[in-house]
Structures are given as structure tokens and as C-alpha cells.
Image: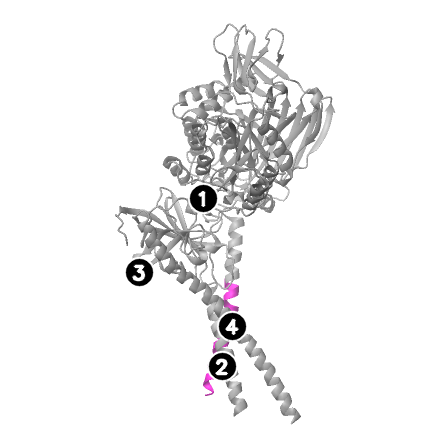
Amino acid sequence: MLSCPNKVLTALAVSLLCLIFFTPVNASAFSEGQAQLQFSDARGVDVAPGVLLSTRASMQITGLINQVQVTQVFVNRHPFAVNAQYLFPLPSESAVHAMTMKVGERTIVGKIAEKQQAERQYRAAQRAGKRAALVKQQRANMFSSRVANLGPGERVEITLSYQEMIRFRDAELSVRLPMTFTPRYHPRSYAVEELRATANATNNGAQGWLAPKFVEQLAQQQDFIDSSREPLLQLDIEIDFGLQLEQIRTPHYQAQVSNLDFGRYRVQLRDDAMNRDFVLRAKVSPSQQAQAAFFRQTAQSGDYGLLMLLPPSDQFSAQQRLARELIFVIDSSGSMHGSSMDAAKQALFYALDNLDENDSFNIIDFDSSARLFRPQAVAANAFNRADAERFVYQLQADGGTEMAQALDLALDGKTHPNYVRQVVFLTDGSVGNEQALFDLVQRQLVDNRLFTVGIGSAPNGYFMRRAAHVGRGSYTFISDGNEVKTQMQDLFERLQNPALRDVRLSAARAKELSYWPQPLPDLYFGEPLMVAIKLAPQQQDMYIDANTQHGPLRLTMPMHETGQTYPHSEAIARLWARQQIASLLLYNPAEAVRPQVLDLALKHQLLSPFTAFIAVEEVATSTVAQHKEQVANNVASGQRVQRFAQTDGQSLWHLLLGALLMLSTAAWLRRERRQAHG
Amino acid sequence: MAKGKRVAARASYWRYGAIALFALGASFFAQGAYMQSKAWLAQWLIERAWQQSLAAPGANIPPWYYADTHVVAKLSVPHLALQRFVLAGSSGRNLAFAPTHDEAFGPLGGEGASVIAAHNDTHFAFLRHVQVGDELSLTLRDGRTLSYRIDSKQVVHQSDTQAAAASGLHLVTCYPFNSPVAGTELRLLVSASLISSSSRSTTNA
């Protein structure tokens, strides 16, 4: 009888030992996991991250154009040579027109070449032990740079020059410089070819696609390698707008703004947070606002003009208010989790509060599948709005981004003679199949209008702009809750006022004008027309035609007197070419327009899906690198790195521990009782 | 007498302590038993939903009336003679009931990479026993049965989702197995590539 409690005690001791023994074992596995994160690629195949990268950007905003130089400084802290690569975003409309590589004191000017040819040159240089740099466009707003044979301790600088039209709307100019990506979701219906390309994006050689590699604490990781490194981002902006600006703001970044002279400003920024888009906004006082501006210049390939025109505001007023049906589409996929989802919900609450009693509305929520708030649009009465608020309130951000289903539901492909049907689409646009979605929008638009609202700290700006262009609406960005009110107010102003439709340009006594983008977007209240035109040698007056609520509108641009000469030669020609490339690729299959795009890109020295910049050293002075390393991107603010699900369970431990405790205490109690009785 | 009383009092303190410990043990045991029984009973309900969804392809049949998910596939491991019914969506709640298809990756049976995740103490506890070269088979709701052969078994960090980028079927569970500490950052990734695909006409079972 005595052996029974002994057994129990032994079991108890064993279970305690188990606990004590197993816990530290697991803790060490834990710290190994941490260590892996810091010192090597998670798979343990790559070398440790020892390549530092910092970015310097300088912008000159002159008139309507922003000229930007972005310098990426690669420093190799490894004791051996590496091939470094980096994936980075640029504004989707940027025209990248020059690249240089600086090794020590030598500067090598990069050349534009057909992409495959450039890749071959790069690989040959890599094998020969020459330092080389290759810059490619991987997606419309995703670019990659590669540096071959970066020796130990060496520093190579790649400088890219690009230009873009500044965005001008509601008497506010804005400039955006994206810093990182929101991971893309590749849906089920994704074309097989692209999927293969993505699946094989295992970062091999010059040919393979790169997949972005994300870390959560980029600055800390780099501090770990070199605590006296340069800040990750140094940005210098010079603004020479010729007009007095009010409130230059840089939300989320602490920038120094100084006013140099009348209409001239300098903005400086040193920062380590590469986790959200840099945005600069500045107001032009309404009294100063010009209704039109025209710049012209003579480039090598002829004369070009850049026109900005703000249609008179009375053209937007309606004689009679048409009834509206508003369809709100909200993205509740996993990538929206956190602050993005909160901002999207707030925007929707704002919209619901500001609906007119006479309007009708519906809500579509989508992640892996799409759900309707009501089967049909319902009247915007107090009851339905309250119900809709509950519907929005309970939305959870999880699942995939099956955007096609939602667009298919939202754009009904019908005409609506008695009312205006507007679709407001709130998303971060983290999709990889943009072109398929643009095709869908174009097919099912008919007289619907699509307004995109880009949500989050690093939304897919390319998707927002192009979807709105194809959807004949306009686009807005909301980075977090603080911006909801102002941005939604502007959006509602555009939704409420009828647009100028079918905007066209023509010239007196001439064949068709060559102007881009084409077709021109519909113009909403507060938005100017921005168009680049190739001018004839003796350009006659130009006419701008549009359809308004009141009937056709014709504005005349007299050519003999207007036109300031734009200082940067080739700048407008490049914009013209870049807009043409964008329009060609947007409305045609890529392979069909390849020769045209390639020709334009080579002629105007532009980076495109079919061209790349390559710079190679004359002589081989480095050792052939055996390792490669991709510089990581910081995760966008409010996002987390994509992970496998948490699937550890302690149920067996609970069973074991529970059984041991119960058995041992039961046995002890029994023995006590027996002793008490005995 | 007084001494005897004190001894008796002390003994009763011990008894209360032991009873409390017993209750603690019972709650641990109940918790563990609950997790296990939830996991295995749910499989039985999901199997019923699976039979129904084979009979009605295209319909998303919830395994119980309030479920917000549906069964998407049957995973079998012939040489271990076991099968698991897979639910759509890798949320923590779904994972308690069944292996789940992580929709952030590709579709099951598609051209690209698809990922199924499950707990390492229930549905995917068997993953420690599979070997490179073993075969898996996956039956989809449209009646197709796909055969895969395991070509790698590796431990990766939870953020290394690129490790599951290659075309094929990836089974994921937490690593190490039977750890008493929750929240490990490591995953066991079993990757298998497609070897054959057969479309079988489904009979109403």
C-alpha cells in the first residue's frame, strides 16, 4: 500500500523535471529564431545583411514639372564582394530619363538599352569582375537596381533622374515620393504566366523578377551594422512656383521649410522612417490662382507645349440636380488590417453622414469574396444609414484581395438615363493583376463612374490613378484617420458637381494634334486639365472642346502671344513621350504596342517595361562576387510582414500536466484519509 | 488534545491545498481535452459537410449552422492511412477545428503555390513522421484528386513566406512539436510537388 504514494511522488517529480527541462530547450530555440532574423536570411541560404543602403533625393519644382534626382548609396560591410540588389518604388507617372553610377571618384554615365540586351551586358560584366549597375522597371511603380561586384568596404552610388507633372487640384499642389510597398496579393483568377513569373521570383541573376523582401525595423537593423551610418533618407526640395504658397505641409514627416525669396521655398528632411509615402502639399491662395498656364520649348525632336487649364467653375454647376446612386466598395482584406481599415471605415462613416436624402446607396465589402450590404441600392434615409453604419462597423480585415468580384458587382455594365451612378472604391490596391482589372473596368463601365480612394501609408498609387482614369472618375489618397475629413470633403465636392466630359483638343486648319494622355480624363470640379502637346512648326490657335451639363463648351488657346519658355530642354518632350507610353500600355495589350513603346523609350531615353539603364566599368578592377544580397524594404506603417499562421498547440501538455496533478493530489488525499482513519 | 487539534488543522490546510491543486489539474486537463475533442469532433462534422458538397458542387456548405467557413478539400496521406478535411481561411478560429487553406497564397489545385496550415498538436501532428518522397493526395470539391510527392521538409521563420513560393502544395505547422511554451516563431514547412491529377466523376455519396 505504501508503494502507491511513492509512485505518485515519482510521477510528480518526473512531471516537474519535464517542465523544468523542456522550458529552457524551447527558449533556446526561440532565441535561435531571433538570431536568424538578424544575421542571415530566414532560410539561412543567403549571406547576412551587410549591405547598407541610404537614399538621397533632390527635387526642383519649377512651374508644373518636378525634376528629381534619386541617389541610392550602396555600402558593402561584408569582408567579401557581393552583388547587391534593391527593389524600390517611384511615382507611377515618373519619366526616368537618366542614370549614373559613381564608384569612388569615377562617374559612369548609364545608357538606355533594350531590356534583354542590357541584361546580357550586365551579366557579362558581372562574370568579368567589372562593377556594373542595372536599373529596370519591374512594374509601373516598382523598379529594381542591381550593383555587380561591390567589393568589401566599397561604396557605389546610383543616381536616377526622373521628372513628373506636379499634381494640382483644389488650388493645392501635391508631390508624392513613395518609400515602400504594400505586399501584393495575387488572386485565384490571376493569369498563369504572371503567376509563374512571380512564383519563380527567387531573385536569381539579372533576369529573374525580384520579390520585395520586408523587414519590420530597417533602421535598427542597419544601426546594428553601422551605428554612424547616414540617415536612410535625405530629401532636399526647391520650389520655384512663381506664386506665393500658403501652408507647405509634409504630413507624417518632420521637414524644415524655409522661404528663400518671393515664390521660392526650400524643404529639407533627414529621416530614418522609410515606412510611408512622403507627401508635400501646398496651397496657392485662390486670388492668385491662374486659370491657365502654357509652357513651350524647342527640343531636338521638335516643339512641345505643356498646357494647364482650369475650366471656369460655372461650367460645373448643374441646372437641375440629377438623382444619384452611390456604390461604396470597401476593401477588408488582410493587407488593410490596422490603421488602414480604421481610416477606410471612418471615410465610409463620413460618406454615410453626408449622403443626401434623395440619393440611394449600397455598400460592397470584399476580401476573398464580395458581400453586398443590400441586394439592391436603398434610399439614404436615417434608418438605412444607421443600418449601414452597423454593417461597416463589424467589418474585419482578413482574407485575400479578390478585387475583380467586387468591381464586377459594383460596375453593372448598364446605362442609367435617370440618375448618375458613382462607384467610390476604398482600397490600398495591393493587387498584382492591375491590367486585368483595368480591362474589367473598361468593359463594364458604360455610364458608371469610378472614384478611387487610396488608403494607407503606402498604397498602390499606380492602381488608384489608372483605375480612376479608365473609370472616368478621379482619385484621392487618405493615409490615415487625420486626413479623412479634408480628403472626403474634396471628394464629395467632385461627386456632387457634374464633370466636363469628352474633353478633346484640336487646332485650327490642321490635322489632328498629337497630344497625350489620350483619351483625356473627364474633368471634375477643382481639377485642371494637364496635357502635353507636340506643336506644329507654325502652330495655329488650339481649341479645347468638352461636353458640360449646359451643352458643348469651347475654349480657345491663342498661340501667337501665349507661352513661357520652359528652362529644362527636353523636359516637355519627355512628358509627352511618357504620357504616350502610359496611354498605349493602358489601352492595349503590352505585346501589341511593344515596338511603338520601345521606339519612343529609346528615342526619348526613358525607362519603360521594355528598356533598362545599364552602366559598366571600362576595366575589371573587382573580384567576381560569389554572394548576392537583396536590400530589404521597410514594412509600410501599420502593416506587418506576411506570416505563416500561428499553429502551436499546448493541448497535449495541458492533458499531461492536468492528469499528473489530478492523479498525484488524488493519491495524496487518499493516503491522508487512510492515515486519519488508521 | 490541543496539539492534536493543531495537527488536524494543519492537515486540513494541506487538504484544501491538495483539493485546489486537483481543481487546477482538472481545469488543465479539461482545457486540453476540450482542444483535442473540438479538433476531432469537428472533423467528423466537416466530413458530413464534405459529402454534401461533393453532391452539390459549387455550394459553400457550412459544417455547422453558424460556421462562417466551408470545407474546401480532403487531404489524405495514404501510407499513414489518415485523412483531414480542410476549411477555407486560416483564422485562429478555423484552425481550432480543422486544417485550413491560407487564402493569402494561391488556390488549392491551382498552377501556383498553395498553403494548408494546421495545429501541431492535432491535425498536423503527423507531419513529424512524414518523409521526403512520401505521397499526399488532395481531393477538391470538383471531384479532382491531385497526387503530390514531398520534396522538402524544412524549418523556416514565420516571416519567410517566400519559402512557400514554389508551385505545389505546402503544409505548414508550428515547430518545435509539443513545446510547452506558446508563440514559437519557427514553422515546419513540408513542400510537395504535383505528380498526377485525375478527374473522377463524383457519384452522389
Look at the image and give the residue range highlighted in magenta.
A1-25
CA gap, disc 3 and disc 4: 34 Å
Q: Which mark is residue A667?
A: 2
Are discs 2 and 3 both within one chain? no
In this view, A29 is above or below A382: below
Label 1 is found on which chain of the structure? A
Q: Chain of mark 3?
A: B
Q: Position of residue A543 (x, y in %)?
A: 55, 11
When the figure is inspected, residue A408 is found, relative to residue A547, above or below; the finding is below
- CA–CA distance in space, label 3 to label 1: 33 Å
Residue A434, placed above or below residue A62 = below
Residue A20 is a magenta residue = yes
Using the rendered image of the protein, determine whether residue A79 is visible from the camera's viewpoint: no
Q: Amino acid at mark 2?
A: Ala
Does the rendering let one see residue A583? yes
**SS type, badge 1:** loop
Mark 4 is surrounded, within 10 Å at the Cα level, by few (under 14), some (14 to 19) or many (20 or more) other residues, namely many
